[in-house]
Image: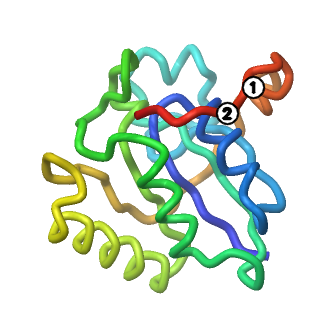
Amino acid sequence: MAKATFGAGCFWGVESAFRGLKGVTDAAVGYMGGTLANPTYDDVCTDRTGHAEVVQLEYDPQQISYEELLRAFFDLHDPTTLNRQGPDYGKQYRSVIFFHDPEQERAAHKMKDELDRTGRFPRKIVTQIAPAADFWRAEEYHQRYFEKHGIAACRTH
C-alpha cells in the first residue's frame, strides 16, 4: 500500500469522492501543514494554525496510480482559487498536495505545470505542493461524514 495526502476544500466531499475510486483502500480526514500539535476542528477553523483540511489516502498502486489520484484531485475542486472552495474560505481550505516521496513531488509538479500549459482552467493553478508533515486525524464525527449522513458524493465545481 502507498499513501497520498490532498487538501481540496472541505474534507467531507473530498473523502467521499476518493473512497469511490477503485484502488483506494482507506481514507481519513484530518489536518496537515500547520504549527499546532494535535489540533481540533475548532483550532483549525480559527485560520491561525496554518493547517489545511486534508484527506489522507491509502491506495494500491497496482490498481490505481498516483497520477490517476492527481487527476481526480484536480477534477474535484477549483485549484485556481487561493484559500477558498465555494463558500468556504480560509487557509484551511487551500488547494494543496502533500507529497510523501520525491516521485510524488515530481508527479505533482509535472501535472500542475501540464494543466497550466494546456489552459484547462481559466486562471493559473495556485495549488501548493509541500512535503507531508504530521497528519492529525480529525474528530470521529468528521470521518465518513457523507456516508453517515446519507449524502451522495459531489464535485465542488
Q: Is residue 56 left or right of residue 100?
A: right
**Of the numbered discs in the image, which one, if any, rests on residue 146?**
1
Q: Tag 1: residue type?
A: Phe
Q: In the picture shown, does residue 3 fall above or below 81? A: below
Please identify the quarter of the rendering in which residue 42 is found.
top right
Disc on the earlier residue, 2 or 1:
1
Q: Tag 2: residue type?
A: Ala
Which residue is pictured at 46% across the width and 32% down the height?
Answer: 156
Name the residue nearer the viewer: 115 or 101. 115
Nearer to us: label 2 or label 1: 2
Residue 148 position within the rendered picture, expressed as x and y whole percent measured from the top left: 86, 22
Q: In the picture shown, does residue 50 fall above or below 56? A: above
Give the image's coloring scheme.
Answer: rainbow
Which residue is pictured at 76% across the width and 78% down the height?
Answer: 63
- Which residue is tagged 2? 153
Residue 125 position within the rendered picture, expressed as x and y whole percent measured from the top left: 22, 53
Quick one: quadrant of the N terminus? bottom right
